[in-house]
């Protein structure tokens, strides 16, 4: 880009700046690097460079700066990615530690609950055995009472039969005495 007049120089330097801005926007997206190429071209011309030389130097500086910034940004991105990966690994480890802790706590709680259920089961079995023993004892007591009642009834019935037989015998004797004598004594 050779400029013959100051106006052309200004336009060509401006086009370099526009080209740089366009490239800056499309290549990095969020990176902002402003470089006043026109001012640098003017400064170089004031110090003895031709317009063509000044533009070539400025163009080379822009390319070098772009390349250096790309390297710096890549390193920054790489370091940031490494840092993020490390943080993610640390978070993953923390989550895994927490999961292990929760599993351990859950297993412990489960074991405690299992022990508690076994104790309750044993307690219920003992109570059931006690109740069965009590029921058997009550049945035995009922059976004894029933047997005693049956014996009393049998004894009473036997006594009544004996008394009835005795009265029968007395009546027979009485009737026999009446029949033999015909007289009542």
Image (cartoon, rainbow, N blue to C red):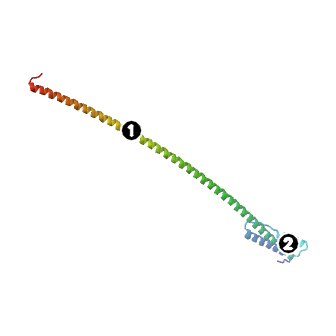
Is residue 96 placed above or below 12 in the rendered structure? above
Q: CA distance from mark 2 to mark 1?
A: 119 Å
Of all residues shown, which one is farthest toward the front?
Answer: 180
Q: Secondary structure at mark 2?
A: helix
**Residue 148 location, x and y as percent?**
32, 34
Residue drawn at (32%, 36%) of the image: 147
Q: Residue at x 44, y 43 (%)?
A: 129
Residue 43 location, quadrant: bottom right
In the picture shown, does residue 86 fall above or below 184?
below
Left or right? Give the position of 126 relative to 89: left
* Residue 119 at x, y percent in the picture: 51, 46
The vertical placement of 71 against 182, above or below, is: below
- Which residue is labeled 2 in the image? 41
How far across and down, in percent of the image, does residue 10 sit?
83, 73
Q: Earlier in the sequence, mark 2 or mark 1?
A: 2
Quadrant position of residue 162: top left
Left or right? Give the position of 53 relative to 90. right
Do the residues bearing badges 2 and 1 touch, measured as CB atoms within 8 Å? Answer: no
- Left or right: where does residue 180 sit relative to residue 10? left
From the image, tell me which residue sits under label 1: 138
Q: Position of residue 22 (x, y in %)?
A: 75, 71
Residue in front for this viewpoint, 72 or 155:
155
Between marks 2 and 1 in the image, the one whose residue lies nearer the viewer: 1
Q: Secondary structure at mark 1?
A: helix
* Left or right position of 29 against 159: right
């Amino acid at each position: 880009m050779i400029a013959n007049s100051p106006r052309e120089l200004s336009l060509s330097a401006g086009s370099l700046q526009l080209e740089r801005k366009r490239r800056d926007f499309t290549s990095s997206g969020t990176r902002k690097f402003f470089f006043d190429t026109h001012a640098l071209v003017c400064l170089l011309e004031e110090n003895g460079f031709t317009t063509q030389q000044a533009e070539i130097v400025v163009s080379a500086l822009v390319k070098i700066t772009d390349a250096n910034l790309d390297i710096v940004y890549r390193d920054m991105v790489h370091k940031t990615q490494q840092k993020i990966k490390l943080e993610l690994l640390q978070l993953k480890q923390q989550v895994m530690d927490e999961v292990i802790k929760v599993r351990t706590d859950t297993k412990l709680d489960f074991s405690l609950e299992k022990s508690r259920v076994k104790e309750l089961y044993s307690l219920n079995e003992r109570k059931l055995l006690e109740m069965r023993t009590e029921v058997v004892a009550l049945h035995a007591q009922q059976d004894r009472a029933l047997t005693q009642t049956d014996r009393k009834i049998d004894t009473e019935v036997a006594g009544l039969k004996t008394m009835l037989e005795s009265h029968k015998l007395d009546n027979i004797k009485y009737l026999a005495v009446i029949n033999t004598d015909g007289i009542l004594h």
